[in-house]
Each structure stands twice: as structure tokens, then as C-alpha cells.
Image (cartoon, rainbow, N blue to C red):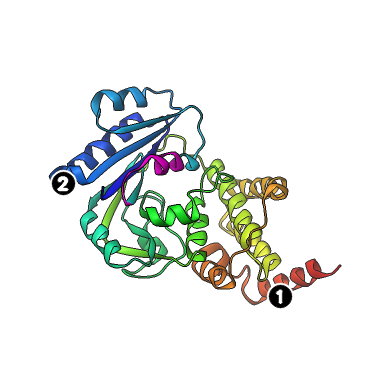
Amino acid sequence: MKASFVIVNYNRKSELLMTLSKTVELIANNATEYEIVVVDNASTDGSADAVKVQFPTVVLIENPVNTGAPAWNLGFARAKGDYFIILDDDSHIEEGLEDAIEYLEKNREVGILALNVVSGPYTSDRWGWKDGQDIAGFIGCGAIFRKETYRKIGGYADWMFLYVNEWELSLRCINAGYIVRFFGNSRVVHRVSNIHRTSKRLRVFVTKHELGVVYKYFSVNRSGYLWRVAINNLKIIKHGEFKNAWYNVLGMFQFLQMRKSLQYTPVSPEAQKMFADGFEITRKSAFGFIGEKVTNFFKKTAATP
């Protein structure tokens, strides 16, 4: 089988049904080469029953508990395709699917192909990605994950419930010798349901996981990058976002509680540099020249017995 769509849903029945409808329409001319796998994350809104009735050919996995993004791994394990097409329950591919698959067939070094997300809070344009560019992460509502890569590095990390998961997976992908690349000719529409999306949850998880990625995988200037991530997450204060800054602080406290359970598995210096240069929160210095001085001070302090 050519490819499997793998979609995770949690209590977004109407959005999920729209995604399935648009996906079925997209592959109508060669449906035998594709399958659709839905992992329902213990929804209570009747999502699973609706899929059974309206889309009986869809492979439905009913997760008994909501495990967040790692639920995609249940779909990856069941999927039969050579490629896993990752979608959110509120996103769909508008065009360019066959072009993307053909590109992956011709470029075996690409482990993850980031598709062109054209709407929603996080778009490819927002990141400034150009077609064919090697990048350090992808937007989780639209990408293609090579099965061969999955078998080598695994799926989403089980210690990350939501947010930053795609960047952590990309770092392991790069470390394994694969490339994460942006493909501009396949467009993904992210309709962005507001259900279960809150600023607090976003900011707490993002800060917690950004710090966790650096703590777990960085070996070069580890303490310096930890401070950079922390300070950059507090810079929103200058825009008057005091509530979000407080949520970021809560995320830092959650990271401190979590870090002892994280096994230290540093990646290669080359993979770390690719990630640090490509991820906005690690690329930006905290306060320019002064921030670098502060970072160096903390680095020396952390290294002192």
C-alpha cells in the first residue's frame, strides 16, 4: 500500500467527519493505494460511533484513555502504507498529495516531509520556509512520515503530551541520518477548531517541552541553551502578555519536576546545531549582546563544582 492517513481525534466529531469527507474525496481516483486510520482518544462526543456509521471502511482505533499526541503511535503501528500522512482532526490536504509522495520516492534521504500549511496559527510562511529547504521541525497538522524512518527512530515521544512533539521527533530523525524537508507544492488547510485549545495549556506545555528537549538531547552548551529558552519565553512580558508569561513560568516549574525522569540521550553535535539554528526559541539570543553575556555567565556557573 502506498500510504496511510493517520489522524488523531479528541471530541471534535464534526471536524473529524469533515476531514474524513475531504480526504475520501481527495483519494477517490486511486483509493486502493491509500487507507485512512483514525485513533480516537477516548472521546465522549460520539466521534467513534459516527465514524463507524458514516465511514465504515476507515480503520478505527479506540484508545481507552486520552494520551495526547503519542496516540499517533497507535495508528503508525497499525498502518500498512509505506508512508504515514499525519493530519489533525481539523486539517486536510487541499492539493499536491501525489506530488509529495512522488518526491519522497525520488529522495530516499528525506525521513519527514513537511507539507505547506497555509492557514491556522502556525503556517509554513510564518516559519519562513522555502520549497526544498532542509528544516529542523514540521507543523503537526500536515506532514508525511516515512515508515522506514518510523521503524528506525520510533514515533512521538511518550513523555510529551502535546506541543513541540514534532520538533522532538524531527531532532531524532536528523540524528539518525535522515533529512526533514519542506515541500511547498502540497497545501494543507488547518481549520483550527477552538475545542480544547486554551492559552494556558499551550504555554505551559510548550515551555515545559522546549526545556525538556534541550535538557534531554543537548550536550554542547546545554546550560546556556536552557537559559536561552527560559528567558526567551519570558520576553512576552514586554508585549504586556503577563498572564501568558505566568503560564510560561508554570511550564518551567513543570519541567523542573519532570527533568529527573528524563533519560539523558544526547544527539550528535551536528544534529544539535541543525536544531538550535532552525528552532526559533533556541536560535534567538535572549537579549542580544547582553543576553549572550548572561548566558555565558550561567554556563560558567553551572560548570563550577
Q: Nearest the camera: 39 or 251? A: 39
Q: In the rendered structure, does residue 34 fall within the stretch colored magenta? A: no
In terms of sequence position, does the residue under pointer 1 or pointer 2 come before the other?
A: 2
Residue at the image point whose x is 56% and y is 50% from the top: 206
Residue at the image point whose x is 37% and y is 70% from the top: 133
Measuring from the top left, give residue 137's x and y in whole percent: 45, 60
Q: CA distance from mark 1 to mark 2?
A: 58 Å
Please tell me whether the stretch drawn in magenta is mainly helix, strand or loop. helix
The answer to whether marks 1 and 2 mark residues whose Cβ atoms lie closer than 8 Å is no
Question: For this view, does 235 lie left or right of residue 299?
Answer: left
User: For mark 2, what is the residue?
Assistant: 30
User: For mark 1, what is the residue?
Assistant: 293
| Residue 112 versus residue 294 in the image, above or below | above
| Residue 82 versus residue 103 in the image, above or below | above
| Residue 97 versus residue 194 in the image, above or below | below
Q: In the rendered structure, does residue 80 fall within the stretch colored magenta? A: yes
Callout 1: helix, strand or loop? Answer: helix
Measuring from the top left, give residue 232's x and y in whole percent: 61, 61
Q: Which amino acid type is shown beneath numbered disc 1?
A: Lys
Q: For the residue carrying disc 1, how many other residues have a C-alpha within 10 Å: few (<14), some (14-19), or many (20+)?
A: few
